[in-house]
Image (cartoon, helix red, strand yellow):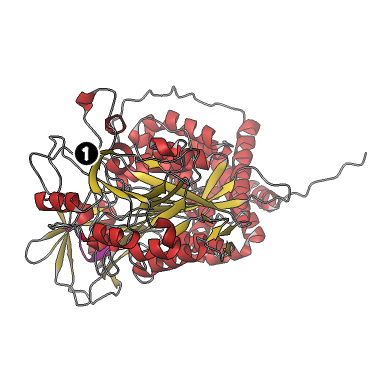
Amino acid sequence: MPWDCESDGVSDLPHGVLSEQLQERLRGRRLVSAIFVTFQFDPGFFEQEVLPVLLDVPLSHAAAIRLVQLEDAIRTVPGQIAVYYDANGLVASDAGSAKLDVQRVPVRHRTGIFHPKNAFLLVEETEVAEDGSRPRALLVAATSANLTRAGWWENLEACHFEELTPAGRTRLKDDLVDFLELLRRKASAESRQDAVSDVLRFLRGTEQRVQRSTDDRIHAHFYSGRQSLPDFLSGIAGSRLVGTYLEVISPYFDDADDCAPLRELIERFHPSETRVFLPRSPAGEGLCRPEFYEAVRSIPGVGWGRLPRDLLRLGRSDELGLRFVHAKVYRFFTKSPKRELCFVGSPNLTSPAHQTGGNLETGFLVDLDLPRAPSFWMEADERKPRDFQPQCGVDGLAASGGTRLELRYHWDLGKGETYWDSPGDSPALRLEARGVALGQVGPLPSRTWVPLKPDVAERLRDVLSETSFLEVIDLAGVRGLLLVQEEGMSHKPSLLMRLSPSDILRYWSLLTQEQRNAFLEARAPELALVGADLVARARLVVDNRALCDRFASFFHAFNCLERTVRQALERGAEREAVYRLFGRKYDSLLSLLERILAGEGPGDAVDRYVILLCARQLCTEVARAHAEFWSVHRADVREIEAALARSSDVRSVLVATNPDEMPAFLEWFDRWFVRRAAPVEVES
């Protein structure tokens, strides 16, 4: 039950569900680009459960079909969806590995762990404004939740959203730009980062507010980790924090006998009273050192606190257990005058989280508009645990289990590359996938992309149809988990289904995402190559239409495809056009041509020839209207042209039916068919 500090009833411990809060903010809008930043990353969970919230499309309950539907929906996003995660924070769960067109970027923070948890969602209105534009906005979230099942579904987390618009002034612009520039630098050299570029372009069009506050109300500020957390709080709020009540919620502490970060906060701000959340195990053990517990309790004006039990229940029954409190909140408030400044984000109450040269952390400091005088969220917890079980957890320590090796595969180029992210050269390393050896790489030079050997790249290509997780084993037998970065995903064959030419044409004719999803759900059980979910089979109907009806359906399908491609290019969604024309998915133009030329498809040679001519006409029109796009994708265009050149094989079959008259007829027919007819105006 993630926690949103903007919910109603702040003094009554605000709470809500993160996915519902996100859906509410996306209502009436559609996604343009998205950046997620996280310490722990479960790619399968993210694709199956988080992406649907962003795309807001009806999906099947069957996992395999849902992935097909998401694969279709995600390519309509004009920009890119990217996840930046700590290279040691990968989580391989039952949800599986990554399969969709999401950029996955591992990050290594040299002095600690890469610990921020943020979302940057660039959105636009679904309704067109009077001037013909679609107003855009940037939603920014700072949260304590990792991109994992526990973070989104099980833990008690904290989150705050801010919205930026081009017309508004904000104190967030400069700090957000600095953080995103830092994020871009932390990625491997030569990595395309289109989502970051999109968000930065939007931010640079906003106006930075000079004043920190207006009418004694502090504007929201973003903590980018460039200074210590106490310095940030003091620099923004200063004397407003002195003498307030302080409430701290953090699941992890230093593995020490004293709490240096807490003492520094108290020395800086001299709170009237302080309560610190005491994390306990399900058995009631204190999750810190006993010496640490006593040291905190011995500080004048400081006591341990507990959150209401009703908030922590996993369900109505106590037998279901309690949620793990993973939230990180630093709350300063006064009762008279009523005021509350709340810092929400990723920093635990640990030295690496609070100091410069430690972890990379982020968060928001917000001055809340209060309906009533605030009070403590937590009750005093004076019951000393009988036993203690100190925990640092993966959030409290620099996690291990990852690797400094990076691996990416370019589906559009058919090649793989490796990158060793360390100052020195790598040792020789073995690659395995699900216990099967893929080959050896290295020794590799430091921080340089090196091509994979062709045989290793070919085996990698084959294994990526099943999993994007690999294990990297060094000479000492130490294993590290790696998530393959996949580029040119439009050219990755669909993992789940293969449509017939008739189905492709019918699919192009569907006008809405809802219609396409319904079609996929009906057809996928017959066509899916993986997945054993229990789903109903749709009854297949044989379509025996007259010749004119068949031709009309071909023309309609290609007209719909052309309109979709041209609209995508006109609104800057080039990736969708690439998917539709050049991709290797179940419904791309190139897939249709390959099936037609293989002798598959509706009807006879006449039908196949007309379809090929429709394809040639489509390409001619797109090349004429969008010459730059056609030129940029010249390598893909050559594949299309090579396929269309093979239409002579089908033509030969037609000529053989009437060698005397058919050649002249086809020459006349081809010339007039490919030429686009001009509309005729009828005089009234």
Q: Does 375 sit above or below residue 187?
A: above
For the question of whether residue 590 can be seen, the reply is yes
| For residue 404, above or below residue 549 | below
Magenta residue span:
400-409
238 and 313: which one is in front?
Answer: 238
**Most foreground residue, 430 or 177:** 177
Q: Is residue 256 left or right of residue 18?
A: left
Inspect the image, locate mark 1, and give the three-letter code of the amino acid beneath it. Asp
Pointer 1 residue: 381
Q: Nearer the viewer, residue 461 or 638?
A: 461
Residue, x 23% and y 73% (percent of image)?
422
In this rendering, would 597 be left or right of 459? right
Q: Is residue 291 left or right of residue 347?
A: left
Residue 586 appears in the figure:
no
Quadrant of the rendering where the C terminus is positioned? top right
Residue displayed at 54% across by 42% down? 608
Which quarter of the figure has residue 323?
A: top left
Q: Secondary structure at mark 1?
A: loop
